[in-house]
Image (cartoon, rainbow, N blue to C red):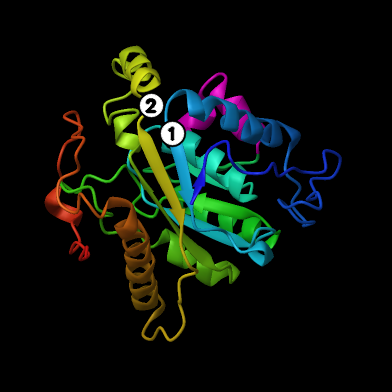
Amino acid sequence: MWEFGRLGVRGWDTGKGRACDHGGLMDASWRVPRVWRVLLRFSRVLVPLICRLRISGEVPAELRRGPLILAANHVSPVDPILMTAACSIAGVAPRFMATGGLFDAPIAGWAMRASGHLRVDRYTARAAEALPTAAEALKAGSVVLVYPEGRIGLDPWMWPERGKTGVARMAAMSGAPVIPVAQWGSHAVLPYASPTDIVRSVLRAMWRRPVVQIRFGEPVDLSGLTGTAGAQAMRATDRIVQAIADTLVPLREDEPELPHFVDTTRPADMSRVRKRPRVR
């Protein structure tokens, strides 16, 4: 297991977005923007102020250059910041698929656009544009990070809930492999209700510095799927979400039911609950 701050530095060629010889990005059609390279490094300074980030597993060196889909469970509003730091350490610079509202914010929106992230205008006529755009980004050599649940999960026991088929369809359209990423503990950093009372939440996190774990799993086997395109997408989605849950199991062996830290601002939604994996 890696612990934040104890890993050797990985870096990028600042001129062309290539990897330095000690790891990181490889030459690809899509170049990592300078703004995103700076934010990736800055996240490794910011995150230790609010938690103790522990990373396990790895992204295989041959996949770090892309095309690659990272599929993660969604626990807290702070997840993208923690995932940015974890990916920086793991040597990948993913393009996040994020809600369109972030792109419209005055400062965050500029950073999202300048970093090359991918906009998803949910519940609008433009929502259908997100998948082909992401598929083209993958074909250009990008790593794309997406939350298959499509929201912060509301499973009462905080296991991954049933996912949307978008990730599976992206994989089918682009041929990109999918690596599951499990995270646990970020709900103790920022609660579901953030940004409500966010100052108090951040100060509490800085004082307690809770442990947050992120684990990169093994590529998901999406071979042998049968049926119509829709049926294959549903079966592939089940495999992807199950892989995320299996990757999460080692991170919460001592809290398989309710978590030790309970976020009282988090509502429960039984409509998309999956069967919980067994924890030995």
Please, what secondary structure does the residue beneath circle 1 have?
strand
Among the 4 quarters of the image, the one containing residue 166: bottom left
The residue at which mark 2 appears reads as: 209
Main secondary-structure element of the magenta-colored stretch: helix
Residue 144 image point, x, y percent: 56, 53
For the residue pair 133 and 260, the one nearer the viewer reads as 260
Work out whether residue 120 can be spotted. Answer: no
Q: Is residue 225 left or right of residue 91?
A: left
Rendered residue at 37%/61% (across/down): 247
Which residue matches tag 1? 52
Quarter of the rendering containing residue 208: top left
In the rendered view, would you say 247 is above or below 201?
A: below
Specify whether residue 125 is painted magenta: no
Q: Is residue 257 left or right of residue 246?
A: left
Q: Residue 134's spot in the image, x, y percent?
A: 57, 55
> Of label 2 and label 1, which has the lower sequence position?
1
Q: Are the two marked residues, 2 and 1, in contact with CB atoms closer than 8 angstroms?
A: yes
Asked if residue 271 shows in the view, the reply is yes
Give the image location of residue 160, x and y in percent.
28, 54
Badge 1 density bin: few <14, some 14–19, many ≥20, Cα 10 Å = some
* Residues in magenta, as a range: 100-115
